Image (spheres, helix red, strand yellow):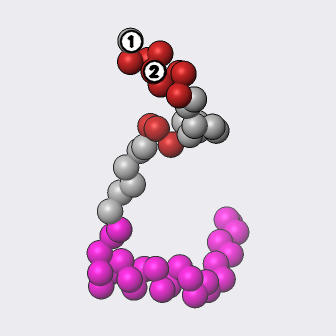
């Protein structure tokens, strides 16, 4: 005879989220941002580099 499955404990967070999904609807899916990993430049460019790039 197979064993009975142990009943899961009540978790208020899950219950609240289920009710919110029924009433409001599911949240929109997230968009993947590719540029998020790129770090901004640490220092501003010098005047010489800016003028050199223009040429």
Magenta residues, as a range?
A: 1-27
Question: Residue 43, percent across and down?
Answer: 63, 37
Residue 27 lies, with reference to residue 20, above or below; the image says above
Q: CA–CA distance between discs 1 and 2?
A: 7 Å
Q: Dot 2 lies on which element? A: helix
Disc ID at residue 8: none
Q: Position of residue 14 (x, y in %)?
A: 53, 79
Q: Are marks 1 and 2 in contact (CB under 8 Å)?
A: yes
> Residue at (61%, 86%) from the top-left corner?
10
Q: Which residue is mark 2?
A: 51
Q: Is residue 13 left or right of residue 32?
A: right
The quarter in which the N terminus is drawn is bottom right
Count residues near mark 2 (Cα–Cα under 10 Å), then give few for <14, some for 14-19, many for 20+: few
Q: Position of residue 18 (x, y in %)?
A: 42, 80
On the rendered image, what quadrant is the C terminus found in? top left
Viewer-nearest residue: 42 or 28: 42
- Percent coordinates x, y for residue 51 in the rendering: 45, 21
């Amino acid at each position: 005879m197979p064993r009975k499955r142990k009943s899961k404990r009540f978790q208020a967070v899950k219950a609240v989220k289920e009710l919110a999904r029924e009433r409001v609807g599911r949240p929109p899916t997230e968009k993947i941002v590719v540029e998020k990993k790129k770090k901004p430049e640490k220092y501003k460019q010098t005047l010489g580099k800016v003028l050199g790039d223009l040429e």
